[in-house]
Each structure stands twice: as C-alpha cells, then as structure tokens.
Amino acid sequence: MLISFFEEFPSTSNLKKLDLIKFPTKLYLADYSIEGYKQYKKELKYNNLKEIIWWPVLNRHEGYWLSPFSKRKALLRTFHHLLNEKIPILWDAELPKNRILLFTQILKFSKNKKLIRNFFKKYKGEIYTAEYAYSNSLTNKLFDYIALFFNPNKYNNKIIKMFYTSMNPLEEIFIKSELEKGVKKYNSKFLVGLGVIATGIRGDEPLISPEQLERDLKICKDSGIKEVIIFRLAGLNEKYLKVINKFS
C-alpha cells in the first residue's frame, strides 16, 4: 500500500520532514500559483519521492477550496494556468472557507459548475479529487449537483475520500463498509485520506493518536486500498513514523 502525504503549508521546515521517509511516497503540495509548485518540484530531490501533485488553493476571500461557489475570476485564473499543462493536480472539492460566498456567488453557480465540468472533461493531466467521506445515493446526488463529487467512471479522476477520524470519530464497521463500496465501484481509482497529524487551515483540528492511525491504516490495507494520503507531512514524527512503517 502506497502511503503519501498532503502538505498544505509548504515551507523549508515542513518539507524537511521528507528526510524521515525511506519508503516510496508521493506529495500533494498546496500552492497558490503553478510557478510556486514548479519551483518546489525542481528543488525537492528525493529518490523515493515518486511524484509531486499540485494542489491549487485560492485566496481566502475567493473561497480557498474549489467549487462552483468560488469566485469565478479565481477559477478562470486556475484554469488559465493549466491551459497547456499535463501535470497531476489535486482538486480539493469542498465548500468555500468563506461561507458568505454560498450566497454572493449563487447567480454564478450554474456557469461555474459548467466551467468546472468542462475542465474535467478536457484536461490532459491526471486529476485527483479530495472529497467528503460520506457517500450514499442521496449525498452523491447532492454533491454531484453542486460539483463536490466527481464520479471516476465518468471523469476518469482518482477520488480521495477524506476519512479524518480525529475530526469525525467513525466506527470501524462503517469505515470498512464505505471502503468496500468504494473499491467495488472504482477499483484502484478509489483512494483514502487519513489524519490529521497536523492542523490545517482551520487551525483547531484535533490530532489523531498513533493507535487510531494504525487502526485506520490496517482497515485500508485489509480493504484493498492502493494508496492512502495522510494529512499532513508537517506533523510527521517518530511516533507516527513507527506506525506508518508497518504498512509502507
């Protein structure tokens, strides 16, 4: 099972944690600009770092995450950067951090949704979508309508379901059921996000214990998940690494 990492706040000290990793891994790297991503890609030279995926984020007032409720100019800017690219990207499909956009952008919602879906259909590079964990026929229909769910069988993306059990305590039986359904539907295009081992943009996320992380990793491995992505690299320490090394 491949174990990769998100890094939302790339910095010298945070990226230095790559020195601790001896197994093959990938890095999902957040940056506001493609130029910043390319510079990091040029500088990060690790033989075991198999791939660096650009995770485009917006300014907070623009929505930060990517959805039809994000500012249209910000979406167009991101798509313009990717116009002639084939790099792998992480599309963080979440409601905007600035919730006021849910109301102020409602008149542009349909146009933005069409814009996003057209991008997914035309983009030549690989797209990973980070999505909310809960899925059933009702939520999938709702999230599909508001472009927070992208069916890999339709868009050829790889889906990362965010099972952050430190933030949302989930029973083992529920996780197993969700993972089995995901693997059955999407095979190797169904990936899992785990965590958190360091806080994100919210700043108040509870951290997962090493014991809980070991349970979640075991469930993923037993369920046939090909890749898990841990949020986030900056929190990697000897205690977490001791657990992760059992599954890498």
Image (spheres, helix red, strand yellow):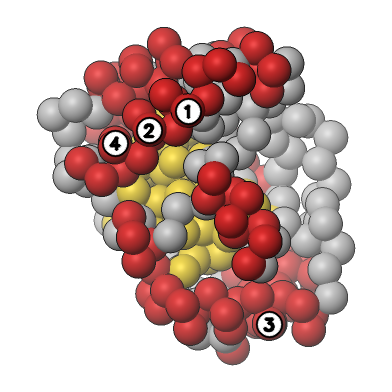
From the viewer's perspective, is residue 245 above or below residue 7?
below
Give yes or no for contact between labels 1 and 3 (Cβ–Cβ under 8 Å): no
Which residue is identified by label 3?
177
Residue 116 is situated, as x and y percent measured from the top left of the image, at: 38, 34
Snapshot quadrant of residue 202: top right
Q: Earlier in the sequence, mark 3 or mark 2?
A: 2
Around disc 1, counting alpha carbons within 10 Å, would you say few (fewer than 14), some (14 to 19), or many (20 or more)? some
Q: Which mark is residue 110?
A: 1
Mark 3 burial class by Cα count in 10 Å: few <14, some 14-19, many 20+: few
Specify the amino acid type for callout 1. Ser
Residue 48, quarter of picture: bottom left
Residue bearing mark 4:
119
Mark 4 neighbour density, 10 Å: few (under 14) some (14–19) many (20 or more): some
> Any mark on residue 114, and which?
2
Marks 1 and 3 sit apart, C-alpha to C-alpha, by 34 Å
Q: Earlier in the sequence, mark 2 or mark 4?
A: 2
Amino acid type, callout 4 = Phe
Dividing the picture into quadrants, the one containing residue 49 is bottom left
